[in-house]
Image (cartoon, grey):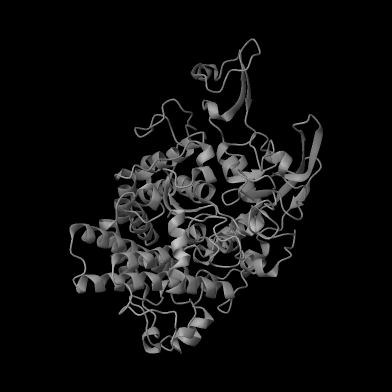
Amino acid sequence: MNILNKILIFSIASTLMMSCGEEWLEETDPNRISTDIYWANLDETETTLVSTYAALMDESVLSIEIDAWRSDMGWPGFGRPIPNKSDLSLWYYHTYNASNIAIDEKWKSTYLVISRANQTIEGLEALMQNGDIVTEEEIDEWNIQMAQARFLRGLAHFYLHSAFNKGSIVIRDEVAKTTEEYSKPLSTSEEVISFFRTDLRFAEENLPVAYDEGNQGRATSGAAATILGTSYLYEADYDSAIFFLEKVENGDAAYALVRDTDLQFTTAGEMNEESIFEISYENGVYPTRSVWDGWSLTNRLAQSHSSDGWVVPAWLVWKYKKEEMDTFDIRNYYTVLDNNGAPIPANEPSRLAHIGSPLDSMLVRNVPLRCSKMIAIVEDEQTEYYQQPSATESLRNAHQGWGFAYYKKYSNYDILSEITESDQPNGGVRASGKNVTVNRLADVYLMLAEAYLEKEGSAGLDMALMYINRVRERWGLKLRGQSSSSLAEFSSKTYEEESYTYEMLRDTLRFIEKPLEMSVEGHQVRWIDLRRWGVLKENFEKLASETYYLHDYTFIDSKGSDQTRLRMSVQIDATGSSESLDHEYEISALNFNEEAHAYFPIPLSELQSNASIK
């Protein structure tokens, strides 16, 4: 969506849409306009459709922070070894229940997407039934609007099915106009799957592969195919998952992995060629609105690296920074000197010829590119961070408070100068205009790797490795498997030359490739993966048994002065002066109960207001 569409959402649609509460069921809502007098043309249904996209802007729909805390992706808030915010730590410790307000908000905000989609669908159906859609141009526009509305309705049902009550939720296929119509029983998981896949198939068949620049952010056929493929993977239907995910890979949309790290998870890289579905935000459109106002067009995810958000757990920091770099990838060197001691320009093609030459002096990056792009850690001396020369100089020296690593995916480190984001216009850290990428090609590749591996076992190893290596090569990492494989695509790169078994590659995908690539992205990706693999409890117990150590990190800053960051470097050994870090996930492992926590329960508010749910 462009900014004109965003303004349209709130200047017009906010006066037309019902609220997400249930009060409207008890009295006439003067703001609610009947289909008898509204949705008289495609411009009016377009307004309602845009408002459906707007409903996705509520952070409760994706619940990214919550699912970082309750899975294995984050430490909740400020303070160690005990976090100081009980409202955050209840997710980490698994002490939430059906009365929790965040569960209620996720339920309501996702059903608001469905309600608005249903309004759009009913308006479009009325236009067609009344004979108002006549010309070929009108028919084409009608089909595209209907496909978008059904995509959004199917997507929201898919999210609810994945998150709540083992998939048994309420199917809402029409706008409820009375209390009786609102009171609908729960449908079975199988019924819900059939319903949202019908919507998504219609969308996949009727949506365009791309839009013009002014309409970027709208659902495409690739987005619908991605969600369909994901849904089949979640149900272990690997043939169907491969069918739809390969449509994304081989379709006309020409998605491609982004190699320019300046265009990955930055403002400059919004709506890039890897992005399949993205939620668009904007800072400054409504400067007078509170950051807590749902109409502000901003998100609060930039607080992910502040004392009010989440920080990266030790196990993930260690895995990120210890990935093996490909010594034949020039991007892994930040200084190369020729045999006369002169720097070789980075843009000089002949520089490649110097890699591995004993005549040259080469300085290897302190941390791999994937680590550098995903998180900020003290060892990353080569990457600018909040307009400082490096994360090393910018990070706050407070491991017992702010922690020792921050996520970068939702922060504005690329355009702001204050690590607290206090220089963010209109609200500071809680008023970010940075887009949120929900689905991207790298995840499609990793899902295809899993599908081929699980479908074919050992026979699927080469296909799985091919997709995994496409992602790893993008980051300049050493490639997995053997260079002699018939599906090895990168002859000039370095391979491990490891002979993988099915079990080895399965565990590598589950506990290294997928979490490191997709950390804190999408809709409950990590949680759902661990749940469907049947390893939630096992994973918490494994992490609880691990001990890491925090060491001092000494460096020379950009002014030539010696500096030390106390206890900021995560290690696995206690050699020398160090501090033990052995408190992560201990209580989580003890408290986690599969039956109680694998899915969110139906919220208490729904049980109280919906008479058809027993």
Residue at image location 56% in from the left, 23% down from the top = 346
Residue at image location 68% in from the left, 60% down from the top = 308
Residue 255 position, x and y percent, is 37, 43
Residue furthest top in the image = 340
Tell me the quadrant of the picture where the N terminus can be found. Answer: bottom left
Residue at image location 66% in from the left, 13% down from the top = 341
Judge by depth and name the residue closer to the eye, 404 or 101: 101
Rendered view: 364 above or below 510: above
Q: Indicate left or right for 382 with 564 as reference.
A: left
Judge by depth and name the residue closer to the eye, 100 or 494: 100
Rendered view: 209 above or below 237: above
Residue 341 seen from this side: yes
Residue at image location 37% in from the left, 51% down from the top = 451
Q: Indicate left or right for 281 with 448 as reference.
A: right
Rendered view: 262 above or below 421: above
How many circles with numbers are drawn on the protein? Answer: 0
Residue 129 position, x and y percent, is 20, 73
Judge by depth and name the residue closer to the eye, 447 or 521: 521
Residue 283 position, x and y percent, is 56, 55
Residue 265 seen from this side: no
Residue 500 position, x and y percent, is 45, 40
Tell me the quadrant of the picture where the C terminus can be found. Answer: bottom left
Judge by depth and name the residue closer to the eye, 504 or 210: 210
Q: Indicate left or right for 598 with 575 as reference.
A: left
Q: Can you tell which quarter of the image residue 319 is in?
A: top right
